[in-house]
Image (cartoon, helix red, strand yellow):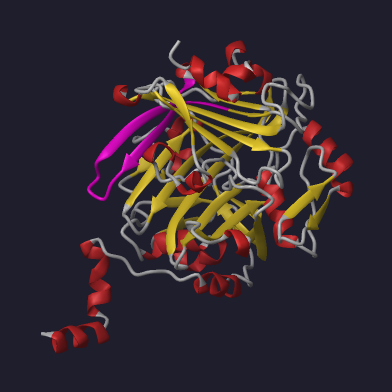
Amino acid sequence: MINNLRRLLAAGVIVALLPAFGWSQTTDRSEVDQWVKDTASQGELPVGTKITTSNWQQYKNYMPLGMQKLFAGTYFWKIPQDAELDIGPTINNFLPPTWKDATEKYGPQTTVEVLPNGHYVMHNYHGGTPFPNPQEPNKGWKVLANVFYAYQPAVYVNSPDNVGSVWAVDRYGNVNATTIDVVYRWSSYITDPHFPQTLTYAPGTWYTEWLMEETPEQARYTSSLNLFYIDQEKTPFPDTYVFVPALRRSLRLANTARCSPVFGFDWSYDDAKTNGFNGSTSIYTGDWLADRKLVTLAHFNQDGAIFPDGYLMPLGFPKPSWGKWEVREHSVTDIHRIPSEAAGYCYSSRIIYADKEHWNGNWVDLFDSNHKLWKSIAYYNDGADNVPNIGNSWDGVSSMAMDFQNMHETVWSGFGNPAKRKPYLGINAPKEYLDGVKYGSPSGLSMVMR
């Protein structure tokens, strides 16, 4: 029996059958380096090209590694046969004039210092993109900083009338739906009009993230709050609080909770932001790998992002009705903990494919502590012309988080279901959600069930 298994393994039969049984081949971190070499020659990808499951290998050099694995069918999750990526023109309209002005004003003076303990400290940052043209030394860390401070409007709100929707999908096709209220907001370094540069509702912070479950009913009012501090050497980890309805009080999570899943989904607390990285600039660093042109959805029909009608199942891949894919410039960087802080951390590498206009990550490949591919997360960041009171702007996000090892995924739409409304941005948010104390401080969690 053992000899027969050995012969089948040597012949590649068992390996070929693994996906049929729900088992997967593994992707090692070394394949990222091979991807960098293979994609060095890209040529041109003309507008009007249609990428399908039949011809994708002709265009694989324009795909992140994780997307290549989906097309190749390496894992349980794979690109549906009727998927189609229609290539349209590239549109650069994600940044409002006030952000560009701040980048031009403050970017030349922003610097980084590496401390004797290996931590990184950024000096003279006051808003905008910290390093608009990152160069050595510490180029990878500078890309990390650009991602960490990537542009979003001063306030981002999904409220009950434009609720954010999440769908957890398992290997059997079962779907569990959740709706979530979201208030993400800058508390310092603000460049949007109609706001002061610094707000005082959470002193010492530059960013706050508030989430609350609306449905299912048994989870209603479960909330989380992340506080990101300006002095990241003093406070290298964000403070994370969770409000537990059954206890009628909030709990402060330990720093090790950065690897915990948010509300049980496939995003950890270090993943749960549209930029693809929610850690810090102190105890993380980056190894710059390459600049590449890659395909992504950057301007799409937001009504198409309604689950499940707008998605190709079971993967939950966007249908062609979303609109045209774009070939955009990306900086590819391996973000990871510094050696002294790496022990016990869940990810050995976060390969982030960061858009070089707005610096949000459009795709992320996550490798576990054994350097095996664990997850891929697509972040479809949408841009828009002339958002009221802001101008050209990042306009929202849809996302797919695919867990290859455990064969389940989470799909997020910030465009509501079935309301199909956009998130509220900046000063356009309802006045209630501009209350920073309620939606951005620990004391605000005590107001959740009032």
In the image, residue 218 lies at what x, y percent?
29, 24
Q: Is residue 323 visible?
A: yes
205 up-or-down from 363: above or below = above
In the image, residue 20 lies at what x, y percent?
22, 64
Q: Is residue 431 left or right of residue 269?
A: right
Which residue appears at 47% of the width and 68% of the height? 371
Q: Is residue 45 visible?
A: no
224 up-or-down from 124: above or below = above
Q: Which residues are magenta?
A: 162-183
54 up-or-down from 400: above or below = below
In the image, residue 7 lies at what x, y percent?
20, 88
Q: Please tell me which residue lies in front, 383 or 104.
A: 104
Q: Please tell me which residue lies in front, 93 or 201.
A: 201
Q: Please tell me which residue lies in front, 292 or 334.
A: 334
Q: Is residue 399 left or right of residue 135?
A: left
261 up-or-down from 162: above or below = below
| Quadrant housing the C terminus | top left
Q: Is residue 182 magenta?
A: yes
Q: Is residue 56 left or right of residue 19?
A: right
In the image, residue 12 lies at what x, y percent?
27, 81
Q: Is residue 314 left or right of residue 397?
A: left
Q: Quadrant of residue 186?
A: top right
